[in-house]
Image (spheres, rainbow, N blue to C red):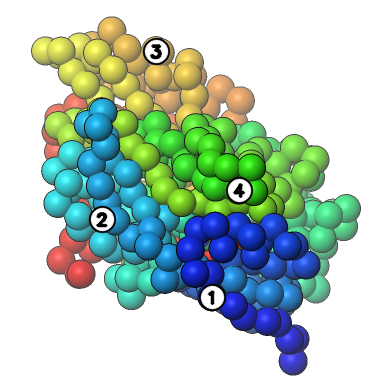
Amino acid sequence: MIPFRYARANDVADAVRQIAAGNGAKFIAGGTNLIDLMKEDVERPTRLIDISRLPLNKVEETSDGGLRIGAMVPNSDLAWHPLVEQRYPLLSSAILAGASAQLRNMASTGGNLLQRTRCLYFYDTATPCNKRDPGSGCSAIDGLNRMHAILGTSAACIATHPSDMCVALAALEARVRVAGPSGERDIAFADFHRLPGDTPERDSNLGVDEIITAIELPARGFAAHYSYLKIRDRLSYAFALVSVAAALELDGGNIREARLALGGVAHRPWRDGAAEAALRGKAANEATFEQAADLLLREAKGFGHNDFKIDLARRAIVRTLTQAARGTPQSQSDKKIR
Ligand SMILES: Cc1cc2nc3c(=O)[nH]c(=O)nc-3n(C[C@H](O)[C@H](O)[C@H](O)COP(=O)(O)OP(=O)(O)OC[C@H]3O[C@@H](n4cnc5c(N)ncnc54)[C@H](O)[C@@H]3O)c2cc1C
Ligand code: SF4
């Protein structure tokens, strides 16, 4: 038995007060990741602060034409929300490509951002892992690394961030709204998740005494030309080997604006300004897409078992951009399962 205490937060200020008191406290939202990690003895919080009943469960329009999504909005409600389906279908597609209908009903928007890596060694407490036990070593670099990163890795960790939703949020340039003891602040999505560097135990730049309250989407939704492609070992209930979120604005046959984000390849959703710049102003054709893919992958490095990901990512980028340009997004296998 590993004892822990449980308390429910009454409101956001109370949640911040409770987390700021420290002593190994953690928030619990849907619990779909944290409970698994506790059962596997990977995480040992001494206090659980239940935030699942905080009034952060609304999707609201903002004055600048965007959307504010409360941190407790379940993944399924968000994917099926009419405003998201109409204006941000890329986000809908990415969410529906993840997990299962049951999990999406439980999983929260805030929890999705902070879900931890699926590296098998991270879960296996008998093996060294710098993320779980800083300074102990990385078992994946010379081990079974088929699922691991090819971009932005370090000598300390080659894990990937497992979220699908976050890949779309990166492409859409979302902002993360957080609250802490010194007030509220916004974090650009690109600055939210971290690369492993020599501190792989830190997944994000959220302070230990802060809570995510909302995600804000700008007005630009790329609803006409988007695609989310997820390549995985099974058609459902599997994490991405490689996933690609592509969003384009076209002017005739030319690309006016382009967003490209990858999942399953790095410690955070991967965006590359040079690859997006290489798409802007160019003809929306295979040659342009291949050039962007080569640029994005110019520093990609495999670790043996995952070498195949480099070519897979290249082909996935070209296919996703092609689908987005044609206005024929990837079919959503889970569309009928609510
Ligand atoms: C079998 C299985 C398959 C899955 N497949 C996929 C998949 O294919 N794609 C995918 O994207 N995901 C997948 N998931 C992951 C799932 O999406 C996440 O577990 C879920 O999004 C986490 O949300 P939660 O609310 O349950 O988080 P919790 O488990 O409650 O919390 C996760 C972490 O976030 C912290 N936290 C939660 N909310 C907040 C907040 N508002 N502010 C600050 N900290 C907070 C918690 O303290 C904890 O550290 C899968 C999960 C399972 C179990
Ligand atoms: S890749 Fe990262 S999470 Fe996996 S064993 Fe290495 S340090 Fe741990």
Residue type, label 3: Ala
Q: Amino acid at mark 1?
A: Arg
Point out the image quarter for the N terminus: bottom right
Q: Label 3, secondary structure: give it.
A: helix
Verify CB contact (< 8 Å) between mark 3 and mark 1: no
Disc 2 versus disc 1: nearer the observer: 1
Point 75% across, 67% down: residue:
24
- Disc 3/disc 4 C-alpha distance (Å): 39 Å
Could you say which is closer to the camera, residue 332 or residue 34? 34
With 3 as the anchor, is 182 left or right in this view?
left
Disc 2 versus disc 3: distance between alpha carbons?
Answer: 31 Å
**Residue 180 got which mark?**
4
- Residue identifier under label 1: 8
Does the beta carbon at disc 1 come under 8 Å from ligand 1? no
Instruction: Check disc 2 and give the amino acid type.
Output: Ala
Q: Are marks 4 and 1 in contact (CB under 8 Å)?
A: no
User: Measuring 80% from the left and 73% from the top, which residue is drawn there?
Assistant: 126
Q: Of circles 2 and 3, which is in front?
A: 2
Of labels 3 and 4, earlier in sequence is: 4
| Residue under pointer 3 | 278
Q: Which mark is residue 241?
A: none
Determine the CA span between mark 2 and mark 1: 27 Å
Instruction: Identify the secondary structure beneath mark 2.
Output: helix
Query: Quarter of the image holding residue 62?
Result: top left
Q: Which sits earlier in the primary sequence, circle 2 or circle 3? A: 2
Q: Nearer the viewer, residue 124 or 140?
A: 124
Residue 93 percent coordinates (x, y): 26, 50
- Above/below status of 218 relative to 145: above
